[in-house]
Image (cartoon, rainbow, N blue to C red):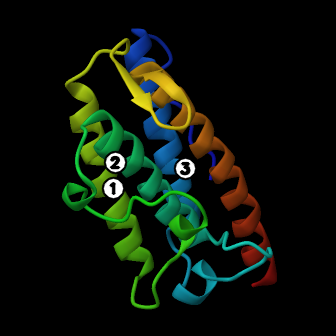
Amino acid sequence: MYVLPDKTTGSERDLLETMIDRGRLALVENLRGLSEADARRRLVPSLTTPIALVKHAAVAERRWFQWLIAGLDETEIDGPSTPGDVSFAVADDETVDGVIAEYERTSARSREIAAGFSLDDRWTHPVVGEVTLRFVYLFLIEELARHTGHGDILREQITAAG
């Protein structure tokens, strides 16, 4: 689903936050309305499915906002935060509605955490090095756009297969 931006002018921060929210919504909309079976359909060799893309996005946001920016210990983070292929794993008892709700809660927490920092505040990521909130926003905008593209293609294949 293509989501038009609802804000096209404003401060840099307003525009970055608008674009990340736009990406969040577009990713979720690719999953919304699919049956549980369709949401889990494997159409590529990897673990990439519509539901797994949303699950992965929640892990990514927890990793950047809760673990790195807020400095929370792994035990304080409100869900899985291990990066890599495992972040695409969806348990049999997880539902489309539940994964969407989990991601929306995670996104809300990301917004709350980010609100306490400026775009120029810095943290040291163990792999990438020094990052700012601006970088995290841009990185996640790109990540969401890429995965939404994956979701667009998967949704089109699922819908066409009817």
Q: Is residue 24 above or below residue 81?
A: above
Which mark's residue is nearer the viewer, 3 or 2?
A: 2
Q: Find residue 11 and report its horizontal and vertical position in percent.
A: 39, 9
Q: Position of residue 72 (x, y in %)?
A: 23, 46
Q: Which residue is mark 2?
A: 107
Q: Determine the residue positioned at 69% across, 68% down.
A: 155
Q: Residue at x 52, y 30 (%)?
A: 5
Query: In the figure, is residue 65 to the left or right of 128?
Result: left
Residue drawn at point x = 19 percent, y = 56 percent: 76
Characterize the local packing of mark 3: few (<14), some (14-19) or many (20 or more) Cα atoms within 10 angstroms: many
* Residue beneath disc 3: 26
Residue 33 image position (x, y, % from top left):
51, 73
Residue in front for this viewpoint, 160 or 143: 143
The residue tagged with tag 2: helix, strand or loop?
helix
Callout 2 crowding tier (Cα within 10 Å): few <14, some 14–19, many ≥20: many
Q: Please, which residue is most extreme toward the front here?
A: 126
Circle nearer the N terminus (1, 3) = 3
Spatial separation of the CA atoms under disc 2 and disc 1: 5 Å
Whether residues under marks 2 and 1 lie with C-beta atoms below 8 angstroms apart, the answer is yes
Return the mark for residue 104: 1
Image quarter hosting the C terminus: bottom right
| SS state under label 3 | helix
Q: Residue at x 60, y 43 (%)?
A: 143
